Image: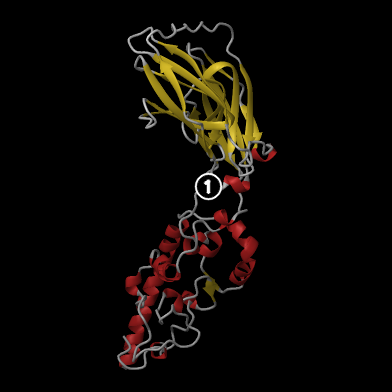
Amino acid sequence: MKKRFLMKILMVLLVAGVCLFATGVASALSSPGVDAQGCKECHQSVYDDYDDMLFSHSVVVDNCAICHIKGQVQIKASADSSLHSSDFSKEVLIYIKRSRASSVTGSSYHVEVEVSDRFGKVTKAEALDFEMADIDASLLGPSVRPVFERIEVDNISVAGIFPEATISWTTNVYATTTFEYGLDLGYDFKVFTGKARLAYYKKHSVRLLQLKKNKTYHFRITGRSISGRIFKSRPQRFVVSAGGVASAQEAAQEGELVIEKIRPLRSTGGKLGIVVTVNRPVKVTLNAREDKKLGLTSELERHGKGFISPKAMRIDVCVGCHNQGISHPVGITANTETTKVPKGLPTLPGGIITCNTCHTPHGGNKKFLARIDFSDVTMCSQCHTKEPFI
């Protein structure tokens, strides 16, 4: 008599738990997921079994990621970026950082370029649209040894209170450079030309201010190519004498400011850069929109950041929608002196009971997606070997 009374209580609790099913599913379906059609490409048999089940868990067809995927990689339809060069130059390569997904699936780009010279004159070019797949891998790759082709002291001026010097150099590859200088080989001062991982040049220059008269300055230059290779110049020096050379005033630039060429380049490793060539030194502002070709063509997109752990998949995900307080305890071991787990009821290593122990996650032919018949009065005694069973 006592056993039948306890069984009725357990059945009432189980039914109450299932009444929360609709609310739980609504919550689950609001979570981000992967394209179910993509899942079917590899897991069609799961869907075939699902269609044959009398009772089913609707999440199976709507959002596999809820129960299987750990932290979805969110892939937006497009990504915008605004990039700027930091130095005046007639030619600059601006590197566009691409999403990890687009390096596999491919993307199309819409690029707008605006340039401004030292005198504030601004001009824009016609927008450039292109497909990543249509660009030849023509950026100089790691196989090209980067070197400094020319290093010159262009001008030393002592006309003002403090002497100044302008030094220029060229590299055989697009690169960013760091100029170090000082009164000895300790190189106490450092100047960056270009912003690392953004704008790359072949022609570089630096203007050094507040120098001292009758002093010898030592300098060296370190370059970093777009492929990441580091290269250095030999130590150099220049002398700031008391007499110096009068500073030549730069002639005003007249005539039209012309953007001569805009061309996309990419490396075999998938890096993308836009080369802008202008008829006089300018700073470049580049606005790029990346439109990703969505599709489940990579492991990254198929399985997000990896799979949810077995414990989280079989307990945590379930209680996120179904109130555990009115169900059988989970996360505990069934390997005790008074309990056992019958064959056919899965547990985690160590006999840990999960929601999946008594319920099939995708669906089944019994009510409540049960593995065993909950209406059977002997249900408790299948696992509990001694009274009281609950």
* Residue 74 x %, y %: 49, 49
Name the residue beneath numbered marker 1. 75
* Residue 117 x %, y %: 51, 15
The quadrant of the image that shows the C terminus is bottom left
Tag 1 secondary structure? loop
Q: Is residue 21 visible?
A: yes
* Residue type, numbered disc 1: Ile
At a point 40% along the width and 79% down the height, the residue shown is 353
* Residue 254 x %, y %: 55, 6
Q: Is residue 294 visible?
A: no
Residue 173 vs residue 151, the one in the foreground: 151
Residue 21 vs residue 126, the one in the foreground: 126
> How many neighbours does mark 1 have within 10 angstroms: few (below 14), some (14-19), or many (20 or more)?
some
The quadrant of the image that shows the N terminus is bottom left
Residue 175, quarter of the rendered image: top right
Left or right: where does residue 288 sit relative to residue 238? right
Residue 161, quarter of the rendered image: top left
